[in-house]
Amino acid sequence: MYLNPNMRKNLFRFLFLTLVITSSNLMAQNGLMRFPDIHDDLIVFVHAEDIWSVPSQGGIAQRLTIHDGNERQPKFSPDGTLIAFTGEYDGNSDVYVMNRFGGEISRVTYHPGYDEVVGWHPTEKKIIFSARRNNFPRLSQLYMINPDGTGLEQLIFHEAAQGSFSPDSKMMAYNKVSREYRTWKRYKGGTAQEVYLYNFETDEETNLTNFDGTDRIPMWIDGKIYFSSDRDRHLNIYSVDPKTKEIVQLTTHSDYDIRRPSMGKEKIIYELGAQLYVFDTKTGSTNPVDIQILSDSPETRPYIKNVKDFITDVKSSPDGKQALIVARGEVFTVPSKGDVTRNISNNSGANDRHAVWSPDGKQLAYISDTDGENNVYLIDSKAKKTPVKLTNFTDGYRHSLRWSPNGEMLAFTDQTLTLYVLDIASKNLQKVDKAEYENIDVSMDLKPIYDYTWSPDSKYIAYSKMDETLLNKVYIYSLDEDKSYPLSTIFYDFHPVFSKDGNYLFFISNRRFNPTFCDFEWEMVYKNVAGIYYATLRKDIPSLLSEEATEIKNRTGAIDFDNISNRIEALPVEPGNYRYLSATETDLFFLNKDEGDFNRFEFRKPETMDLHSYNFESKETKEIVKEINRYDLSANGETIVYLKENNVLHMRVAAAHGEGESFDLSGLNMHMDPKAEWMQIYNEAWRLERDFFYEPGMHGQDWPAVKEKYAKLMEVASCRQDVGFIIGEMIGELNTSHTYVYGGDNKREAERIGTGMLGADYEEDAASNRYTFKKIYSITDWSRSSVPPLSAPGLNVNEGDYILAVNGQEITTNKNIYSYFQNLANQVVLLKVNDKPTLDGAREIKVKTLSSENIIR
């Protein structure tokens, strides 16, 4: 076939363009690669919580494991034939082993604690792993075990998290502390990691690195120990000579931190951003590995999700016939009957919240970050039109959105603790007040000023805030005067609400003092300190408790602030733990709970409370429904909508007692785009630090640049665990401890199979091939809310006795001792024990196992 020069040029351009596009598409499908290891011609790593392999020179990766649980920390055996890894096949993190092709996977450890693979012994072909079994729960220790689960031994260290043997196994370089999962960068506190050298022959320990920052994950290669350190503010690879203690920096990355370095003979492989790099200890060169992941990423695939288990807020429509529900960042309207459930906001890439119904029921308002910042939006209640953006904030956090009764205004509070009123027609903002003080460590949506309430005529707003006395005080703001008036005096007052006619203001006050003395120490404890009080708002209005109170209907007017604090009275209710008032013409509704902690720090606060009502005419209280999460009273005062666990229910006020009727939540569905939701979560985490971090200078960080830096990694996230890791890396740049990332809707989770525990340490008797009780744990008399299994009276099991069988299955050292107790957690089991290694004369005893031994160790 003959091609003229022009055709050749065009064909070349086509092939080149095709190659570029194909290469670009291949790279676009790559994801985050973590926990790498290398052995000669093969690399293993974790992607989407599965283990993959790829040739050392790069290429197309192949998946080795596929399971709903996480698989992490793959480590090659010294000869490269086996791979040990941390897996969750049975729901718990244990040590597993497989061949280098991903086959013959078997479980090695069975302890219910967290077992994490660290590496291999260089000559004994034993797996090294860290665990917190026999120590204070925060202290890790190192263990070794055979790949078949036998030969478990604990290394000598009181505390050790990472370690690497010398080639002759006479010494070990190790870290005492584990901080790989903590999102602390450039940390120099009390748990900063050092590399220690321990000599097994001389029983001597030496601090090799002696740096006040991070020196972690030692790797002993030939005559040097390699480790990662942030001595230049970024984690890079260093080496230390164990004889001279000379430290040399070997890599100089400044874009991302080196994470999870792992050694393979003369090479070290590590994570850097979304790539893997290999450092050659002989040549000193470091190069990225070109890896292509072409398989599907099922966790990124959009799908339909019912979000009834993710409800965060419920409201009643003005007529009580529908519920307004916020779930998983979506706004829904759900009818009590007849109509259809509507997803109003319908955007998994935005967090839509604090939705409220307009007084006429025709519109909804809500706060959304759909444009990247928290702004207020307006939409018709049937979502037939495009939402209207009412504000144009470029930073900040907003919460507690509430509509004025006349339908003309919306109020909300922002991250500066300032309450604003927004005129819907003009979009003008009016500042109401700002709290200069607040309790620490309270939820963002409970930061002041969150408990404000509109007067029925929309001319006043009542609210509470903390003043310089560090007590919450109730204030009333006049919109006409643009002025706030104090109502409270010297007590802790909060959660105000106007009466339906606007003549009274109810509020809760912690002023009932009946101390209880501690039974151990001479200390006073104040419980049930709350009462319900009210202020008569005009001098011509009689006391609510008087007979004349029923004769003042339709008597309205401006609030008389002169001596208003002298017109405060208590409703005749017993001292309690009252919260969240709502009023109709005949009743006052509130939450209460007899027992629990009700401090304003939300410390150990009850998850549920009981709904009660107080009748103005009979002056009696009654319980309506128990153990609810929240409630809302319809604007017409006829219906109560409430959340109880994952159910939303409604009841008529006139017949309010017992359980209400459930809304049908089967239609609470959203179109879930995981990638869009993950990016929203990432952006929101970044904004929350920007808006709430205690140091305005962000510890010297260019915070917008940090966002862009880690957003590049978000583009290749392939599972929810990746998102948590990336957010942790981002907030770690703030160099602040205790800034953690928790939770997440992991799509793939393994079912947990518990291991029964007897509260004992075991020892192998090689001569008999049996296990003995090396130590039996007990606890002191005063803490015996539960008795350790083998310490119960009458069992007479002693240290040194043999454990021979459980539930008829004979126990030998051919298997891991804990493997015999699979799926026996918290169950009564039948044991055979003896003071000699034989079934002859063995005693049978019944004990109830534990699921964890933390409380008794």
Image: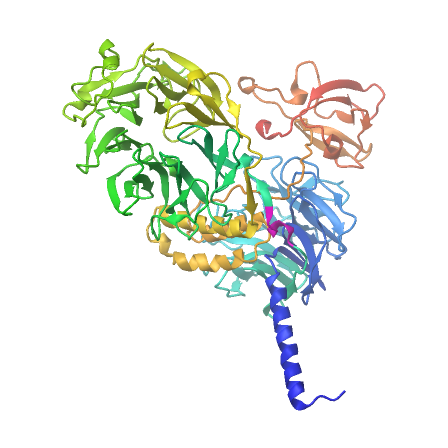
Which image quadrant is residue 768 in? top right
> Where residue 235 appears, x then y in whole percent?
51, 58
**From this viewpoint, which residue is outermost toward the left?**
562
> Can I make out residue 128 in this image?
yes
> Coloring scheme of the render?
rainbow
Q: Nearer the viewer, residue 580 or 779?
A: 580
Tell me what residue is drawn at x 51 percent, y 55 percent. Answer: 209
Left or right, 807 with respect to 684, comes to right
> Where residue 735 appears, x then y in whole percent?
42, 51
> Where residue 472 appears, x then y in whole percent?
28, 29
> Where residue 261 appears, x then y in whole percent?
59, 57
Q: Quadrant of the C terminus?
A: top right
**Image vertical order of residue 15 relative to residue 562, above or below:** below
> Can I make out residue 213 in this image?
no
Which region of the structure is painted magenta?
A: 297-303
Left or right, 326 with respect to 111, comes to left
Q: Which of 541 and 852 is in front in this view?
A: 541
Q: Is residue 302 a member of the stretch shown in magenta?
A: yes
Q: Quadrant of the N terminus?
A: bottom right
**Image vertical order of residue 800 relative to residue 409, above or below:** above
Q: Which of 131 and 691 is in front in this view?
A: 691
